[in-house]
């Protein structure tokens, strides 16, 4: 009969992709997804990128363990945080039944053992308690709209602030065959948008097969072709003219590129290239090939040695960049990284104040980008439909990525989840869009 399971995912879209693959493997082994309140096994897929993410993951593990054990279910913790801190976590959180880092083999074996307890009990330990009422029905998940597909893992860049290589190791590309298999499975399940993710997505290539342009072409030509293809996590030096032409041909006009700062001095200490002038030249190239593209980025304030002048240079860059959306992080020292112990540490309060100022500037400049869309024709990918033209549907336009950006509300037409509806932008509010279906009121 197997177990029922629920996966709680924390962190970035790359973790969403990992959870999707884990769900597929558990399902292939005869186990079934279920709601969190009825599943035999709760799996928490953790994030260990920065301290706030670690704290959120630990809180989620403790909450899940309490809820699961109260009704006799099991708890498993997997993913990045476990990969890096497993021994410490095992000592501090004995409530967890299974610890598993990035290799899911131990989890699959454990769930198989739990299934034996569910089906017939185990002489080796307490059985999972199952209600004497009828078993809960198979969880019917909503039709997928977007699906994350991992094209690579790990990173060779060794930015001085980043712990990702310490957690996931060096860059490792997924094979073209593996990517295309995953894409077919998601499309067969009803996905309309495929989102390619990796630590360094623009670098993807396979010897003797080709690079990102061919991959996008192959994905676009699949039977039941995706309505949208999207790339996330493009490192600045990987945004080549060739890649931009491939995006213009096969993907949505959306470029996600982590710039991190605009001061050349700060970027050198981060072990990254570029400066404000180089960033602006990159953005000019993007817009020459992808007019009107939404550019998303991330920035760090308070990195060791960041002076008032460095920060003012960053603020000046933001006023010229025309970004659609960006995230701001206060520098968070991570053990084992090259930035640990760097001189000229920025006081925490100063870093926080700079982050607040930068966030306000980013919101102000982004507001100009979104307001300029008023009156333009768009297509809305519906994520929550409506039965009639008077109802309010919710979705996204191509300039909004799933989970991390704003949303679009749509009126004027009955529509279902997964529909792609032509519309006109009526208004914007911050990063959110209001649209009226073409021909609607």
Image (cartoon, grey):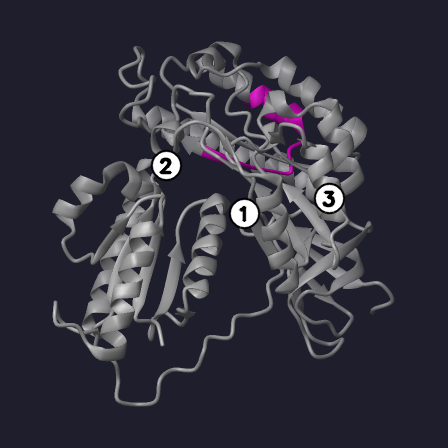
Q: Earlier in the sequence, mark 2 or mark 1?
A: 2
Of residues 256 and 211, the one nearer the viewer is 211
Residue hosting label 3 = 218
Secondary structure of the residue carrying tag 3 is helix
Does 3 sit above or below residue 164? below
Q: Residue furthest right?
A: 439
| Vertical order, 205 against 386 (above or below) | above
The local crowd at label 2, few if under 14, some if 14 to 19, many if 20 or more residues have their Cα within 10 Å, is some
Mark 2 = which residue?
Answer: 49
Say what secondary structure mark 1 lies in.
loop
What distance separates the C-alpha of mark 3 from that of mark 1? Answer: 26 Å
Residue 419 lies, in percent from the top left, at 73, 65
Q: Which residue is rendered at x = 49% and y = 15% of the image?
A: 267
Task: Check the picture and name the quadrant holding the C terminus.
Answer: bottom right
Q: Position of residue 260 (x, y in %)?
A: 50, 25
Q: Is residue 431 visible?
A: no
Tag 3 near tag 1, CB within 8 Å: no
Rendered image quadrant of residue 143: bottom right
Neighbours of disc 3 within 10 Å: few (<14), some (14-19), many (20+):
some
What percent of the width, then of the height, locates residue 41? 30, 66
Q: Magenta stretch: give its range.
A: 315-328
Which of 378 and 127 lies nearest the eye of the viewer?
A: 127
- Quarter holding the N terminus? bottom left
Disc 2 and disc 1 in contact, CB within 8 angstroms: no
Residue for point 22% across, 73% down: 117
Mark nearest the camera among 2 and 1 is 2
Residue at (57, 26) in percent of width and height: 235
- Mark 2 and mark 1: span between their CA atoms? 17 Å
Is 318 a magenta residue?
yes
Inspect the magenta stretch and tell me whether residue 422 lies in it. no
- Which circle marks residue 404 in the picture? 1
Residue 322 marker: none
């Amino acid at each position: 009969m197997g177990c029922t399971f629920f996966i709680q995912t924390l962190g970035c879209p790359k973790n969403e992709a990992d959870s999707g693959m884990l769900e597929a493997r558990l399902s292939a082994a005869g186990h079934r997804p279920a709601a969190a309140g009825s599943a035999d096994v709760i799996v928490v897929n953790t994030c260990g990128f920065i301290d706030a993410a670690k704290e959120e993951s630990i809180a989620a593990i403790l909450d899940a363990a309490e809820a699961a054990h109260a009704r006799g279910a099991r708890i498993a913790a997997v993913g990045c945080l476990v990969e890096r801190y497993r021994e410490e976590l095992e000592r501090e959180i004995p409530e967890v039944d299974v610890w598993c880092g990035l290799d899911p083999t131990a989890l699959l074996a454990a769930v198989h053992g739990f299934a034996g307890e569910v089906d017939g009990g185990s002489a080796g330990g307490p059985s999972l308690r199952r209600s004497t009422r009828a078993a809960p029905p198979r969880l019917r998940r909503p039709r997928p709209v977007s699906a994350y597909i991992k094209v690579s893992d790990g990173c060779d860049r060794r930015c001085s602030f980043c712990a990702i290589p310490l957690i996931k190791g060096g860059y490792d590309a997924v094979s073209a065959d593996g990517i295309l298999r995953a894409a077919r499975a998601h499309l067969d399940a009803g996905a309309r948008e495929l989102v390619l993710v990796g630590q360094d997505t623009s670098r993807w290539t396979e010897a003797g097969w080709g690079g990102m342009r061919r991959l996008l072409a192959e994905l676009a030509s699949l039977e039941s072709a995706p309505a949208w293809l999207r790339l996330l996590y493009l490192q600045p030096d990987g945004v080549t003219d060739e890649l931009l032409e491939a995006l213009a041909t096969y993907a949505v006009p959306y470029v996600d590129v982590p710039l991190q700062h605009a001061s050349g001095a700060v970027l050198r200490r981060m072990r990254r290239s570029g400066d404000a002038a180089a960033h602006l030249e990159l953005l000019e190239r993007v817009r020459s090939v992808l007019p009107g593209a939404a550019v998303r980025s991330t920035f760090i304030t308070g990195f060791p040695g960041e002076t008032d002048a460095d920060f003012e240079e960053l603020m000046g860059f933001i006023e010229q960049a025309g970004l659609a959306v960006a995230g701001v992080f206060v520098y968070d020292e991570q053990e084992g990284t090259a930035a640990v112990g760097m001189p000229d540490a920025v006081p925490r309060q100063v870093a926080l104040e700079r982050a607040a100022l930068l966030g306000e500037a980013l919101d102000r400049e982004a507001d100009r980008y979104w307001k300029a869309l008023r009156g333009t024709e768009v297509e809305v990918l519906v994520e929550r439909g409506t039965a009639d033209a008077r109802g309010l549907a919710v979705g996204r336009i191509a300039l909004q990525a799933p989970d991390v950006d704003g949303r679009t509300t749509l009126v004027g037409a009955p529509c279902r989840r997964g529909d792609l509806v032509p519309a006109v932008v009526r208004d914007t509010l911050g990063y959110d869009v209001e649209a009226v279906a073409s021909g609607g009121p």
